[in-house]
Amino acid sequence: MSKLKVLIAGGGPVGVITGLYLARHGISVTLFDAAPSPPEDHRAATLQPSTLDLFEELEITQSLVEQGFKSRFFQWRDRVANEIVAEFDYGRLSEISNHPYVIQLEQQKTVYTALHAAEKFDNFKLHRPVEVVSVDQTADYAEIKVRHASGDLETHRGDYLIGCDGGRSIVRKNTGTSFEGFTWPERFNIVSTPVNLGEIHGFRMRNYCSHPDRWVSLMQVPGEDGKGLWRCVFPAKTEETDEEVMSDAWINARFSECLNAGPYPIVHRNMYNVHQRVAGCFRSGRIALAGDSAHVNNPIGGMGMNSGFQDGINLARKIIEIEKGADPDALLDRYDRQRRLTAIEYVQAQSIANKRLLEEKDAEVRRSRLNDLRVTVSDAAKHLEFVKRASLISMWEKSEEIV
């Protein structure tokens, strides 16, 4: 067993996967999370091919594949012309990925799967519900102070601290690290219905339908009974109130407007603000950031959680090398260079481009960009590069190249 001890603030997907990776390699890891159990807030639900490949080492990929819905294709549609613009095929990744498809699976199920895998490791500990109050560090250790439900405060020390505690990260704020970027003016409302929209409208499991006023993104997830739920992401206009946007009337108006159908039964609804931000540095001394603590983006494309998994595994591998005697500063500085640059170049750039294509109002620009998709999907080399980027395989490759 390693002498190193790692603390992780945040027991969500990225924190648990990072902790599991470290524990499997003999590192003592302790996680702290504010929620009593993994939240079921209906956000991330896509496991990209790059993620499924990385998870093979953790021996959880097969379980996730069995629990989820396999999606090989995804569509870009034009609601104005009522046509399919392009259908991209992850099957083209078959020579470079063991999983040339996406798995649609709610994020809490990924968390539970990882936690189950971690049960066999005595060096993996998770404390919840506890609130992270503050963090500190010296030249010799990192320290975290947490508050229990009873109000009692407790201090833990470790060799390193990883902040996986989300976009409002206490870890990031306590290090004084900037979080530059912007917030989109509209809110997103994620709505779930058990009605099989794919069967009715001919959708694939993942679909992006562009429109200058009311675009919509749709995907299918298993749901609690495994029979399937359709998640629809509807943008709310700035003048529409929160109460209005969350109402049955507003949601069914969107079904009618975007799908020429409905009303449909509504199982879940979840409205939230959307941010595009990147931390000024992913490493400060013995403290590092991963996932939403380090970068947040809009959900169009299913990149946020998956890029966070890449952060966590990249960082865990470096800590394992440090335990073996490698230079900590050199490795942690490289982590910052690798993951911050690629977060900007791939996740931020692509998710912003995806959203702007969905909502483009200039008719000529819109036609040009949609035509670019038609050209891309019809050219074998461009098609492959597109799905490599969409699946974050290109991001991982680029990250690993940075010295």
Image (spheres, rainbow, N blue to C red):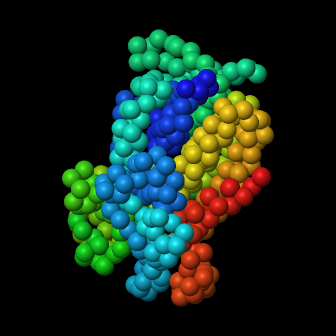
Is residue 386 placed above or below 38 in the rendered structure?
below
Q: Which residue sits at x=29%, y=77%?
A: 201
Q: Residue at x 52, y 14 (%)?
A: 154
Q: Is residue 78 above or below residue 150?
A: below
Residue 366 lies, with reference to residue 350, above or below; the image says below
372 or 339, nearer to the observer? 339
Looking at the picture, how far across and down is residue 75, in whole percent?
43, 76
Relative to 97, residue 199 above or below: below
Query: Residue placed at 56% from the left, 22% from the top?
Result: 133
Could you say where residue 336 lies in the image, as x and y percent from the top left?
72, 45
| Front residue (pair 253, 379) | 379
Q: Can residue 353 be spotted in the picture?
A: yes
User: Looking at the image, which residue sits at the far top?
Assistant: 152
Q: How many marks?
A: 0
Does residue 285 appear to the left or right of 315 in the view shown?
right
Q: Nearer the viewer, residue 305 or 119?
A: 119
Image quadrant occupied by the N terminus: top right
Give x and y (percent) for residue 171.
Answer: 62, 31
Q: Position of residue 337 (x, y in %)?
A: 74, 49
